[in-house]
Image: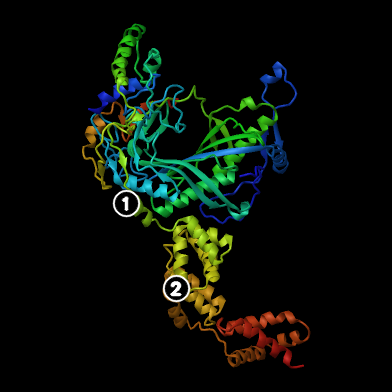
Amino acid sequence: MAMGSSRALLILSNFKFKPTLPFASSSLKPFPPFIRNNFRTRNFSAKTSSSLPPPDLPRLAETARISLAPNEVEEFAPKIRRVVGWFGQLQAVDLDNVEPAIRADTEGDNLREDVPETFENKEALMASVPSYKEPYIKVPKVLNKE
Amino acid sequence: MASTLFRTIQIHPFLLYPTALFSRRNGVLYCTMKSSQSQTATQEKQQPPKVKVPQHALKKTVDKITRDYEAIIGIETHVQLSTLTKAFCSCPYNYGSQPNTSICPICMGLPGALPVLNSKVIEFAVKLGLALNCKLSLNSKFDRKQYFYPDLPKGYQISQFDIPIATGGYVDLDLPLEFGGGHRKFGITRVHMEEDAGKLLHSGNGAQVDLNRAGVPLLEIVSEPDMRTGIEAAEYAAELQRVVRYLGISNGNMQEGSLRCDVNVSIRPIGQSEFGTKVEIKNLNSFSSINRAIDFEISRQALLLSEGQGDQIVQETRLWEEGAQKTITMRKKEGLSDYRYFPEPDLPEVILTQEYVDSILKSLPELPEMKRRRYENMGLSMQDVLFLANDMNVAEYFDATLSSGADLKLAANWIMGDIAAYMKNEKLSINEIKLTPKELAELIASIKGGTISGKIGKEILFELLAKGGTVKGLIEEKDLVQIVDPVEIGKIIDKVISENPKQLEQYRGGKTKLQGFFAGQVMKLSKGKANPGLLNKILLEKLNAKS
């Protein structure tokens, strides 16, 4: 499933370095954090050697809504740094004569006609909902949008 | 936009636009004013005194203060597209359906489900980009905007971050005459595609989610911060509504949520180049709310700045309270959001060919701005232009009436006057009235040519509107042809005069007002068919004839 590869990307995206990865280059930006609609220019790859600051793991876990015990933070930080290092090896590739791509793959559109289709098995859908009080999905009160 | 004076909006009862409601209630404005003297600790604990000031006096004070500042206003608009299915799945969308009846694994974000883009979304996006005079990105992509909220099933919204489908456009519009008129041009920074979230309803100590709306396609339009007053902002929003309706890509209905506007307002002393602190305002449900909320916020900020309390203006999101007619703080956000954007791996690049774009450009209807300029060039007054071009259906009706040969000004007057009044009374749209443009042209010609009198014309108009039929048919059926033969009119007048000797004597004795009485009687006898002009001319002759 596509979720696996994207989780790695998720972790990657929070690090303060200018990636030269073709598929991730344009949308990543080091701190300050992204402010909606303020991003105008694309960051092209800069051949800097990766002297990466250590990841702010507690913050990372908070944004991903994953709870980590202090000993887990200590345990995971070096492991994550190593994963980043593996990807960092790609920095060695010379991209001076390569046009930055918008996305990784090159296949074209996969479009669908605007024709309605009702999904029949609604019972199965609602059976997977932890707390369903017809006709609504019940959720706890959430104060802040993230 | 060199002129930076903030002008208070005058309260005006007459409104041209059916869709833009610009009424403001007359009344007393409450304001809280902090005393300019330094406050002791105990004083600070108390509520600042609430001063009850008559509205006109307060306006003058506010006017004076805000005159020193320039407001910078930008608007983010979300347009809900009227496609048959959602953006990334084939679920239909119908406003007002029973909750959670139009859902599937894709829009519910269930594991394993993959999005597939609806081709109509691209078509609508290109249409809007072209209509807003934007540069289209022939290659663009989708990105994930990640945050957690109960109405966002996937935990991210599929949007477009750094490469939107359209950038760098503008809208031309004309401000309504009752607000001073004038032409404006406002820049559009970008237009991009994204999906809507579900609906979250608070209830008791929890909340409820309806995912019918999750995945519905949206186009987000970000304006340049070019607006300077509430009315400019409201008119910008109204023009966007006009454009999306003309294009047929959305209902553009603020009350239903198919057009949503968030406004950003900051002010700075005139002459200063740095921008002030930006405040976002949400919960605007009508054009008049946009207008009033901005005016209020400008006043609020200006008052604070003028009292040296500029630090009280913080970057935050405020809600417009329609009842209280003021903005209030929403919960203050801690820090800025980190949405961790990255390209959506499950969707391919969006590729447009120049041929595709050109074919859509060719298919665009005449847009509001073009229509306004065309009507203006035909010789219509600005008032007529703004009314007729506001609703695409009205403009079409007007154009059809003209192409049936009707006189320009008369056609405009009939549509803007009696026909508009009828539509308002019966709550009908112009597509629902029974009078066809061809028959309206016929009616105008009949009156102009003298076949029937203007008064009779107005009478049969009502029947034509309600029941249809042809003008010629009605004239024949009801024997409405105007009497223009002076001899015949003379005969009727003679009869009336002979039947009313007393009034005749009174008239000749000096009561010249009785001419009206005679005229009325002649009209009655002729069943309204006598030509009024001739009637009065001959009547006067006869009344004054004998000594």
Q: Chain of mark 2?
A: B
Residue B28, position in %: x, y? Answer: 68, 41
Q: Please tell me in which quadrant of the rendered image residue B510 appears.
A: bottom right
Q: Please tell me in which quadrant of the rendered image residue B31 appears.
A: top right
The label shown at residue B404 is 2
Q: Write down the residue under mark 1.
A: B355
Q: Chain of mark 1?
A: B
Label 2 amino acid?
A: Ser
The answer to whether one can see residue B58 in this image is yes
Residue B85, position in %: x, y? Answer: 30, 45
In the rendered image of this protein, does residue B372 appear above or below residue B195?
below
**For mark 1, does the 10 Å Cα neighbourhood hold few (<14), some (14 to 19), or many (20 or more) residues?**
few
User: In the rendered structure, which disc, 1 or 2, sits on the residue that comes first in sequence?
Assistant: 1
In the rendered image of this protein, does residue A86 appear above or below residue B235?
above
Identify the residue at horizontal 74%, vertical 85% (top origin). B507
| Quarter of the image where the C terminus of chain B is located | bottom right
Q: Please tell me in which quadrant of the rendered image residue A72 appears.
A: top left
Label 1 amino acid?
A: Glu
Q: Secondary structure at mark 1?
A: helix
